Amino acid sequence: MTAVLKRVARSQTTITVQNLLQETETEGPLPIAALVSIDELAKNTGPLLSALVSSPDADVNPEFREILAGLGYEVPRTDRALHLVWKREVERTHAFYADPPRAMPASLVPRA
């Protein structure tokens, strides 16, 4: 799953939940625990790869709230705030994995 998300990051895009599950040959709902584990490993050195997992309409995935909570971040209370945090994490991830890497904007995700 990490390899797929890094490839998506390098391509400067996002991936829908359905496409991620197909590409990783994962059945069932989005494996939130796996995404938390992936981000847990990189949260001190890089952005949140899980932000690249989008809804079918290429917007914020509702499960992103659960992922943030699982990582010990303060979860945005409104949909608008969640969207802003998500959009910034997508920007940060794209900057980090760009070739050559670009400076990452500041994170909007405070620790809980």
Image: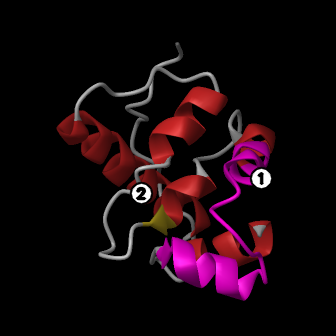
User: Which span of residues is magenta-colored?
Assistant: 15-38
Earlier in the chain: of badge 1 and badge 2, it is 1
Residue 2, picture quadrant: bottom right
**What residue is drawn where x is 50% and y is 55%?**
51
Give the structural element (helix, strand or loop) at label 2.
loop
**What residue is drawn where x is 23% and y is 40%?**
79
Say the numbered circle drawn on residue 10: none
User: Is 21 or 14 nearer to us in this picture?
Assistant: 21
Say the numbered circle drawn on residue 34: 1
Q: For residue 99, say whether it is visible.
A: no
How many badges with numbers are in the image? 2
Report the Cα–Cα distance between label 1 and label 2.
15 Å
* Relative vertical location of residue 100 with respect to residue 95 in this rendering, above or below: below
At label 2, counting other C-alpha atoms closer than 10 Å, the crowd grade (few under 14, some 14-19, many 20 or more) is many
Give the structural element (helix, strand or loop) at label 1.
helix
* Residue 24 magenta: yes
| Apparent side of residue 33 relative to residue 92 in the rendered image (left or right) | right
| Apparent side of residue 3 relative to residue 61 in the rendered image (left or right) | right
User: Is 19 or 13 nearer to us in this picture?
Assistant: 19
**What residue is drawn where x is 70% and y is 52%?**
35
Q: Which residue is mark 2?
A: 61
